[in-house]
Amino acid sequence: MGRAILIVFLSLAGIIFVCNQWITADTNDENLEPFVEQYRYLVFDGKYDLAEKMLDNRYQELENYYEEKSLAHKQTFAQLAGNTNQNPEQIVHLLNFLDLSISPDEEKLVKEKLKEIQILAENSDINRTDVLEKWTSLSSFIELYFPQEKVHYVNEALQSYHASSSLETQQSLLYYLDYMIPEDEKDNTHDAFIWTAIIIGGSIIGTLFYVGYRKYKAEKELVKEKQTRKQNS
């Protein structure tokens, strides 16, 4: 009896602990979104002093939040927050990092941002500086999810593309951006295509088999009916 009560007590304690952690995490996310929105408003309005004070007031909370995500997140946040010093360019980098890192699926979001850069690079009429600035503003966050080697290749290709607009530099940049897509994602796309082909092909074969069977059965019934008529006559 005592053992059963102990098991029930431990189970309830575990459930309460998990629920509490979930509620706390949920609350933290909800608290960060309004903060990022307000911080963005102050930055775009040029109120850098107020933005810096607001960041200082929430710095410890943000540091704890990123520490729970990963050491790399924490270090990147500390580096970006320490480099602002009312520098609009660096503040935008930090703002992009905050936007991406509070997303429920930040890895998916950063891939979408990469696709946006790729689309910009494909447009020959776009300002090459815009492409470089968009990549630069996201590079700190991109480095959290992609191998350093791939990021380095894109950096070099971007510098060449920015310095000289030619078909060669453009194609080189597009190649390395495409190269950054994880292999497993490409494999999943390939697998999805194979399964789609199998399902469609199987459906067609199944339909043809069914139609052929019905035709064979009808012809057999017709032959049988003719034989019966012949015998009766």
Image (spheres, rainbow, N blue to C red):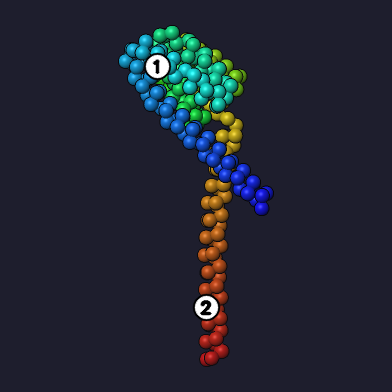
Q: Which residue is mark 1?
A: 54
Res 113 label:
none
**What's the residue at 52%, 78% (across, down)?**
222
In this orientation, does residue 132 appear?
no
Q: Nearer the viewer, residue 142 or 35?
A: 35
In the depicted structure, whether residue 28 falls above or below residue 87? below
Residue 38 relative to residue 174: left or right? left
**What's the residue at 48%, 22% (across, down)?**
61
Q: Amino acid at mark 2?
A: Leu
Q: Nearer the viewer, residue 154 or 204?
A: 154
**What's the residue at 56%, 42% (across, down)?**
15
Q: Which residue is mark 2?
A: 222
Residue 180's spot in the image, x, y percent? 56, 25
Residue 130's spot in the image, x, y percent? 41, 16
Q: Give the structural element (helix, strand or loop) at label 2.
A: helix
Q: Nearer the viewer, residue 221 or 200?
A: 200
